[in-house]
Image (cartoon, helix red, strand yellow):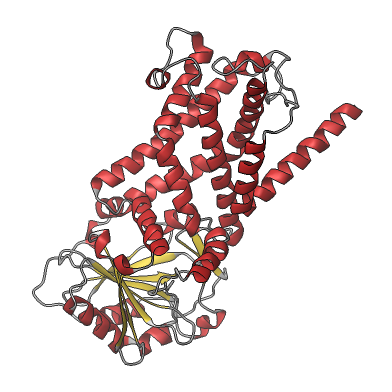
Amino acid sequence: MSVFPADAAKRAATAGPLPDQPRGRLYAMLWRWHFLAALIVIPFVLWQGTTGVIYLWSEALIDWRHPELRFVTPSAETVPASAQLAAALATAPRHFHPKSATVGHGHGVKPASPASDMEQGGPPVQEILLSSDPRRSTIVMLLGEAGLPYPVFVNPGDGRVLGSLTSTEWLPGITRALHGGWPLGKPGSWLLELADGWAIFMIVSGLYLWWPRGRGFLMSLWPRFDRGSRILTRDLHASVAVLFSIVFLFFLVSALPWTAFWGGEILSRIQTSLGQKSPSGFSPGGASVAQMTAAMRPVDEIAAEARARGVAGTLIIRLAPWPKAPLFLMNRDGSPSDDRVLHADPKTGKITGDFLRSESPFIPRIVGFGIHVHQGDFGPVNLWLNTAFVLSLLWLTVTGVISWWIRKPLRGLGIPPKVRMPWPRSLIVSATAMCVLLPIFGLSVLLVAAIERLLQRQWRAA
């Protein structure tokens, strides 16, 4: 594996301090690790960016592709939610053989219904979506054998089933699952968390590499078109990265609560110890057909009570498969500040909890805000800004690759040379803190350092 020639650090650090000075050696060292981080992060950027943008626009795409399933003629009267659920379940296959024990849900991984559900007469029911728009059909979301959701559409006016889509045709489900690490389950989520940590490091180190030295702050944001292709491509890369850096960090940090390890293990324990758990909890759904059939009347009652209490937007009703799980209702499509969750007894339909997200502890509120921004729930402006954010990531990938190609030697990958120097105390403290706060990232840093040392020994031996 080739590296840059001996004067590469001096040539590459054009905008930084001279390499024969302590600050110059630090610059060259961080530039090397910035390069290594890019090798790890770029594949994930392309994957997450693509699946994320498709998810953002997936509902609109389904509206356009299948209007006969998504829209109905408004009716003055509607049949009960239980009747719509029953109609959807009547079309479901009687034999269900789950192929996976886990279901990707959001960015985390939740347990699927027990395997015994295949004896219960059909696939698990993930959720029921009751729209507040009379032109919209009701959606009963079932879980397929691969652990992916698929929708059955019902006319709320007469309870007639309009049709269904497969799991791969249902873009909101397949893209959300792929974005969250499916079909790898928890290991997929761990990989995403690994890339998240390296991306955070890449942004922080990139800011240091870009930081103005001898140029004004605003002038440093303007690409230098008269300095040759090497400097121009670097500036085109760095300028966009700096302009979007705060947005990048927000998306990366706010995505961590959705991961299986950091969100499911670390943050959950922190919230418990600080008394910051959300009182409303969360339900992944996934109850068996038998469980949902037994809860038909309570489903009607919680839906009616939600509307009576002024719950706005589309109602999402779920029941988890484990014992004592409450009938869970939440809303969407309204203002995020109107987020609300109701709990009901799945046997009687009696309301046992009514929670406003705005009244939740600080950490759940912040996590909820990040989820809404990720999903584009603040309206068209949010959707377009998120799309622009992903396009900027693609821009950084392209300009970064071009910059590397211009600088690399004719043979080899052109990894920047290793700089031997004692680490400044501030860097040691910062790196240690980041490795402790993001354990998967920390373990990967140790692994990269060990592999690098092993390769160096082999090269010396050769």
Instruction: Write the residue at 65% across / 14% down.
Output: 10
Could you tell me residue 445's position as x and y percent?
68, 44
Residue 253 visible in the displayed image: yes
All told, the count of numbered labels is 0
The correct choice, above or below, for 219 with respect to 291 in the image is: above
Pick the residue in front: 307 or 11. 11
Pick the residue in front: 448 or 120. 448
Could you tell me residue 174's position as x and y percent?
44, 57
The residue sitting at the right extreme is 461
Pick the residue in front: 200 or 119. 200
Pick the residue in front: 85 or 277. 277
Could you tell me residue 359's position as x and y percent?
31, 69
Position of the N terminus by quadrant:
top right
The correct choice, above or below, for 278 with respect to 410 in the image is: below
Instruction: Write the residue at 42% across / 11% down.
Output: 225
The residue sitting at the front extreme is 425
The residue sitting at the bottom extreme is 348
Could you tell me residue 8's position as x and y percent?
67, 16
The residue sitting at the left extreme is 76
Instruction: Write the residue at 56% across / 79% down.
Output: 115
Residue 292 vs residue 197: left or right? left
Residue 286 vs residue 456: left or right? left
Quadrant of the rendered image containing residue 205: top right
Position of the C terminus by quadrant:
top right
Residue 146 visible in the displayed image: no
Quadrant of the rendered image containing residue 38: top right
